[in-house]
Amino acid sequence: MNSRKFFAIGASTALLAFGVAACGSDDSDSTSGGSDLSGDIAGAGSSAQDAAQQAWIAGFQTDNSGVNIAYDPVGSGGGREAFIAGGKTDYAGTDSPFADEELTGAEDRCKKSGGEFVQIPVYISPIAVVYNLPEVENLQLSPDTLAGIFAQDITKWNDEKIAADNPDADLPDTDITPVNRSDDSGTTANFTDYLSATAPDVWTYPPDDAWPVKGGEAAEGTSGVVEAVGAGEGTIGYADESQAGDLGIASIKIGDEYVAPSAEGSTAAADEAKENKDGEYVYSFDIDRTTTNPDAYPLILISSAAACTAYDDSATADIVKGYLTYVISADGQQAAADNAGSAPISSDLQKQLQPAIDAIGS
Amino acid sequence: MSGTTAPVGFDSRDVFGGESGIGRGRLPDWVPYALAGASLAITFLILTLLDQVSAVRLVIGTALISGISIYAVSRAVESPRQAKDRLVTVSIASAFVFAVLPLASLLWTVVDRGMARFDTTFFTESARNVVGEGGGAAHAIWGTLVITGLAAAISVPIGIMAAIYLVEYGKGKRLARYLTFFVDVMTGIPSIVAGLFAYAVFALIFGPGIRLGVMGSVALTVLMIPIVIRSAEEMLKIVPDHLREASYALGTPKWRTIVKVVLPTALAGMITGVMLAVARIIGETAPLLVTAGVIDSTNMNPFSGRMETLPVYAYFEYKTPGIPQDASYDRAWAAALTLIVIVLLLNLIARLFYRRFGTEIR
Amino acid sequence: MEAATGPSVWGLRGGERRLGDRLFSGAAIASGIAILTVLAGVAIFLLIQAVPALSASTDELAEGKGLVEYIAPLAFGTVLAATLAVIIAVPLAVAVALFISHIAPRALAQPLGYIVDLLAAIPSIVYGLWGIFVLGPAAVGVMKWLEDNLGFLPFFQGPASVTGRTMFVVGIVLAVMILPIISAVAREVFSQAPRRQQEGALALGATRWEMIKMTVLPFGRSAVISGSMLGLGRALGETMAVVIILSGSGGITFNLIGSGNPPTIASNIASKFPESSGIEVNELILSGLVLFAITLLVNMGARSIISRSERHAAEGKKRA
């Protein structure tokens, strides 16, 4: 090989590497769009919110074409930590509210820019108990039975406890394979919270992000659980209702009735939830899991957004304010319901929360 | 992993042949092939009758029947030793086919599921403001090319210079021993740790929450450098010493000898090694999530703003799908298909380079 | 080679030559030092992040377990999955290497080698999706059969998983991933087996298999071992494919076909990291250090075997 050829190759390799890097630009059309908001904000947190965030971002960017919003679904814990650390993380999405040290950290972060901490619920998702048992169409489960199944005390589908809940069903003699999340998640936290509140005698574990029972079938993410339940007969798991697809959805016993998850029931349960305030704009909710009102479906996940009332840069504050206003508006909640299958928050709750958002940037 | 050099000197490479060995008689060359074909037909027939046709069963059945029949025929006509030789040959050939089955299945799956969205839109549009169906991965394709290209631009010169040091300068020196040892250590870095490291470095400089395309490149560089060094080292080692000695004898300085003699000789092999290293890192997900972030718009400037890559895109389309789920899953598979096509093209380019510029030294 | 045209072409005086050499070797050394610096950075970062977990009390740690109790099942799962993969992959990889180097028709050998190398370049997330959508469901029947017929072995004691998210399937997927690495190393060495010995064996009337058994395999043995070690290293660190496929809800068990498998270190980091905060993060990074140490041991083992075989080869050459 001669030297010219050698250099030609070297040069073309370098060109290949840098030519690609050099033509950088952004494809967002920065004209039109009907608003004077412009700039970038970024959030991080809950992956349960990811599909809803995608819908909100798409909706908000369509109305405000000068705005770029990014949301990293790094997980609620990661989102809270990033928000407290400050810097480029302008808002966070979290499945469990900021607590104790985290709350102090978040208040400190906001104080640095002369503002206060804001935490509002934005996303309500019904959690469905999904199962794969082709012979049984409408599975009904009381909390004790459900807890027994997931605690691995009940191991056969024709167990008499299940039979007692389903007098008309023809239950097979199949082994039960309970499926849980292998990653830590807010869905697991809410599900275990529900079990420990409604069936304290059977479910003796404390509510936790991580699944406490060993030896069940574990799958990564909601899609993993749905895929695992779909893959094998005799499986039962818990997942966001919107992702259940063709799987059977069990009705759980509330009061004296067996109730299937629904958007209306979830919204009602969120309205019934006891409101806590850890600060003027810091909302969190205790869901009444043991409700006997059959119109409310208490097995839900309420996920929140976290922000500050002031940012170093007023443009950021304006975008965060506009974005969160859109998020809890009827339009925004409907967009999330369409793309993520969430239950919209009620207009009463929206009215109650709006002042917290109005405080941003003022 | 250069091309195979076939041993020259004996020609018994036809699959079932074996001209060597002393036997009583000798089977015509076509007999083993005919027996193998017949075995395939018989297996297929049996499986069809049992209604149990599958590729794995077909391969196993064919291997068993042809192995036994060829062994029996050979033993009757030729010698027991010859029969054993043929049996081993059948076993090895079957093992090869068996090992290639997963690849075929994998490629088939990805092509089959990926074709649904492998359309023009997928390559020309980003996921900006896309909810539900439609949208594309142009932003992720560009992000993949820029981030990987930049990672290669950093790690290739450093890696190759370090390999030159190891082979040409450092023999027996303490630095070289440390370097070899720690390059081995480096291959064991879990990829998420590389990502966290890159994040920690940049967060020190730019503050927390920072996300840049170049951070992803740095994380990938940590993973890529050891692979580049190892392959470049191997290629430099097989450059024969007599080439170097001839050059020195003519009074050429050492650095000129390396640039003009050693590198061109090893160049093609090193390019292959680099391409394989790129192929290895291009599929990383975890380190990019904490460094390059997630974004749905196209950004080609790695030094400003977030960038998304194909694996990250595919992973989150799979993990947090919207409604309808199939639209997201289709995009995930199309992204996987695109990734494989890119890797295939890189491999092909690498092989062509090798064939075109590879210096025959062995 | 154009370069070899004589000293006059260069027209360099001694000073210039020394300067060039100094610059070039300086650049080479600088690259080496740069890499060591990055590594030192990674190591310091890891240690700083891991140390708080060592001094934390048991209640603060994940799942309220002690460090050893938490990490031991992970380390066990990591080693089990990787070992399983190597056991499945090595015989197949040797067969593939032999097929390409000594058996396939010559015109086929190179394209076949290319196809096998391709397996090494497919991103692991694709393997994960394939494992969960295709291989897992297909393996359910096989695992049921294993439980019914070989259930007396601890590996197959069951109850068999009905979804296919088992250590067994993970082992197969990892085996497919590392097979090309092992076979590439083996193939290179098999094709360099001393030709004179091979021809001699054939001339003495050996069949091809006898020739391979007597000359090629002994020659390639250490290469196969070191290739397997390289593959083992890759399997130990694999993350995404294991995260997607494995149902890692159990502790230490040899049961390969059940639902409760021990997770691996890398997959545990990837799936727990997002929702972790505080001391749990430090604990995860500490488990990363353990993986680091395991991989290092494997790599050092491979290095020492390779260098021993190189010494043997050198001695062999001297004798020949």
Image (tube, coloured by chain):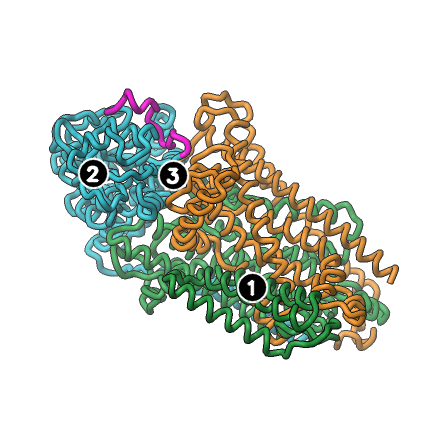
Residues indicated by labels 3 and 1 sit on the same polypeptide chain:
no
Q: Dot 2 lies on which element? A: loop
Mark 1 highlights which residue? B94
| Chain B image colour | green
Residue A274 occupies quadrant: top left
- The front one of A194 and B316 is A194
Mark 3 highlights which residue? A217
- The chain letter corresponding to orange is C
Mark 2 highlights which residue? A139
Residue type, numbered disc 1: Ser
Give me the residue at 15% from left, 37% from top.
A168
Give me the residue at 61% from left, 65% from top.
B271
Give me the residue at 45% from left, 28% from top.
C62
- Return the chain for callout 3: A
Residues indicated by labels 1 and 2 sit on the same polypeptide chain:
no
Q: Dot 1 lies on which element? A: helix
Q: In the image, which is nearer the foreground, mark 3 or mark 2? A: 2
Residue B300 left/right relative to A341: right
The majority secondary structure of the magenta stretch comes to loop
Residue type, numbered disc 2: Leu
- Return the chain for callout 1: B
Q: Which quadrant does the N terminus of chain C fall into?
A: bottom right
Based on the picture, tell me whether residue C184 belongs to the magenta stretch.
no
Cα separation between marks 3 and 2 = 20 Å
| Chain A image colour | cyan
- The front one of A46 and C33 is A46
Based on the picture, tell me whether residue A202 belongs to the magenta stretch.
yes
Residue C278 x, y percent position in the rendering: 45, 29
Residue B191 left/right relative to A243: right
Residue type, numbered disc 3: Glu
Per the rendered image, the range of residues in magenta is A198-215
Q: In the image, which is nearer the foreground, mark 1 or mark 2? A: 1
